[in-house]
Amino acid sequence: TSYIFIILRLHYTDDKLGRTALHWVAVAPKENAIVNELLSAKVNVNALDNEKRSALHLAAMEGKLLTVASLLSHKGKAGAKDKNGSTPMHYAAAGGHVGIVSALLQAQKKKGLEERNTWKKTALHIAAEKGHSNVVTLLLETGAKINSKDQNKDTPLHSAVRGGHQEVVRTLVEWGGFCLFPLLLLVSICLFFSFSF
């Protein structure tokens, strides 16, 4: 703990990546106690690195639920966008971190559901693309728009089929997912399921 105060006394700000001590500690093993010490020392919880990522982005990316909770309780911005327009929710969805997605949804009161990154992808697009059925289900249950289109006019169902994620495809179809090319989708699903059994 004393090294935290040494770092703070030396006015440590950031490194060549633009990351502060909080950025690095947020993704370290057994990080939460140190994160809480830094936060109690009133460091800038929303400081951005060169990629415009906060410690919350990094903790969400790495699946650090306790750290995410601490950052949110100290006014970490759940809707902050990095240089690619991605929010912490995009990163949590990409990693399949359902607990973090849930915490971010609660913090934003569902506002983050339809946030889009530079490629117009929502968290649902990304979770479907990566095959994280538990995150897909949570987002759908919370009210995510199942047929929203990204910059390529792809829906989450397109992404799931393209990625070969059978369980996600099944979930999206059950929830009424739509594909712009129904015949192609049908052929893809039939081929996929025929080779899976």
Image (cartoon, rainbow, N blue to C red):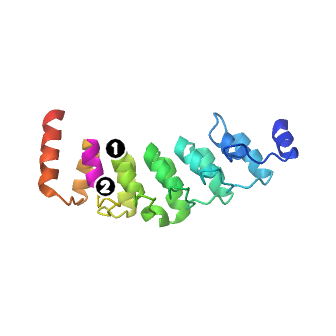
Q: Nearer the viewer, residue 29 or 115?
A: 115
Task: State the extent of the magenta-drawn residues as a range.
Answer: 156-164
Q: How would you rate the neighbour count of disc 1 (Cα within 10 Å): few for under 14, some for 14-19, many for 20 or more?
A: many
Determine the secondary structure under disc 1. loop
- The quadrant of the picture occupied by the N terminus is top right
Residue 144 in the image, given as x and y percentages of width and height: 37, 62
Kindly identify which residue carries mark 2: 156
Q: Nearer the viewer, residue 134 or 42?
A: 42
Residue at horizontal 51 percent and vertical 66 percent from the top: 109
Residue 50 in the image, given as x and y percentages of width and height: 63, 50
Determine the secondary structure under disc 2. helix
Residue 172 in the image, given as x and y percentages of width and height: 26, 54
Q: Is residue 160 magenta?
A: yes
Mark 1 is on which residue type?
Gly
Q: How would you rate the neighbour count of disc 2 (Cα within 10 Å): few for under 14, some for 14-19, many for 20 or more?
A: many
State left or right for residue 38 relative to residue 104: right
Kindly identify which residue carries mark 1: 131
State left or right for residue 77 relative to residue 114: right
State left or right for residue 165 relative to residue 105: left
Residue 117 in the image, given as x and y percentages of width and height: 46, 59
Question: Quadrant of residue 190 in the image?
Answer: top left
Residue 63 in view, yes or no: no
Instruction: Kindly report the distance in space between the C-alpha atoms of the residues bearing marks 1 and 2.
Output: 10 Å
N-term mark: 1 or 2: 1
Mark drawn on residue 102: none
- The quadrant of the picture occupied by the C terminus is top left
